[in-house]
Image: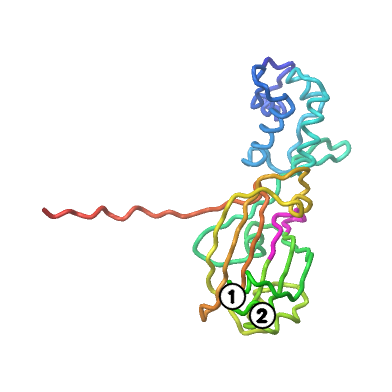
Amino acid sequence: MTLGYSPQKNDPVTDLIKRLQLNEQSSEPYYLQLKRQLHAMIEGGVLESGVNLPSERTLAEAMRVSRTTVKRCYDELRSNCLLSTHGRGGTVVQAPPRANSATGRLKGLTEEMREQGKTSSTRVLHCEVVSERTIACLFKRPSVAPLLRLVRVRMADGVPVTREVAWYDLTAAPALEDWDTLGSVYAFLQDHCGIALVRAAQSIEAVMSTPEESEVFGFEQPSPCLLLKRHTYSAANQLIEYVEGTFRGDSYVYKVNLGPLPPAPVLIK
């Protein structure tokens, strides 16, 4: 599509508009084409937090579409917490903080955020002692064994990154029932229960957000997320924690360090 915007040399607005392409032959509405491309740029780090986007009028003229089309695109990105509007400051990218997970060492989200220079915070939704047959089986406890169920929203720089549901074996760590939910649960387990968590088995799968998760993340409809399930063990190889954490799909990066392949076996004839 031919641009209707007069390009300026070294102008970041011009650079952005050059990246945007609208397909007139596609059945996909223009606002969705723009939204998809801008979303990919934000998620891929091409557009970083704090970057100003063109005004609705400027982008509409440049792409030869109606201002309503651009407004609808921006509104949907705002509803997904990817853009914010600051009065005269215009429309600003608000990329979600990313939780980077790498194999090799057990660490919590607080430590991961600190390593990235971000401030982590937590909002506790529920903290209660329960009995759940299925979860008790994971801990190899009777169906009526007491468990601490903790539901939290974990945030980075004030932006929700994950909704986390965790269960803890109170038979192994009875003092945890008196935890005030402040600070690190791992630190409390070590300092007050004498239990150091040393290893974990973790799986990752793609899911769609539940209504509860959509509300936390500000989604207007179910959206792709990553579900992390983690079994965390003590030095005595006892399962202490089971966690199901749902991360919004654009806020989690999983990194794996891969070494060289082992040498191929030599066949002796």
Please report the residue visible at 82 percent of the width from the left and 29 percent of the height from the top: 71
Instruction: Tell me the residue at 71%/20% (across/down).
Output: 7
Provide residue 60's location: percent of width, then percent of height. Answer: 78, 22
Q: What range of the chain is rendered magenta?
A: 155-165
Within 10 Å of disc 1 (Cα), the crowding (few <14, some 14-19, many 20+) is many
Classify residue 16 as left or right of residue 137.
right
- Could you say where residue 216 lies in the image, as x and y percent from the top left? 77, 53
Q: Between residues 97 and 114, which one lies in front from this camera angle?
A: 97
Label pair 1/2, CB-CB below 8 angstroms: yes
Tell me which numbered mark, 1 or 2, is placed earlier along the sequence.
1
Instruction: Give the residue pinned by disc 2.
Output: 145
At label 1, the amino acid type is Phe
Q: CA distance from mark 1 to mark 2?
A: 9 Å
Disc 2 residue type? Ala
Where is residue 22 shown, x and y percent of the image? 67, 22
Label 2 crowd bin: few (<14), some (14–19), many (20+), radius 10 Å: some
**Residue 170, picture quadrant:** bottom right
Foreground of the two, 60 or 153: 153
Whether residue 10 sits left or right of residue 122 in the image: it is left
What mark, if any, has residue 139 been given in the picture?
Answer: 1
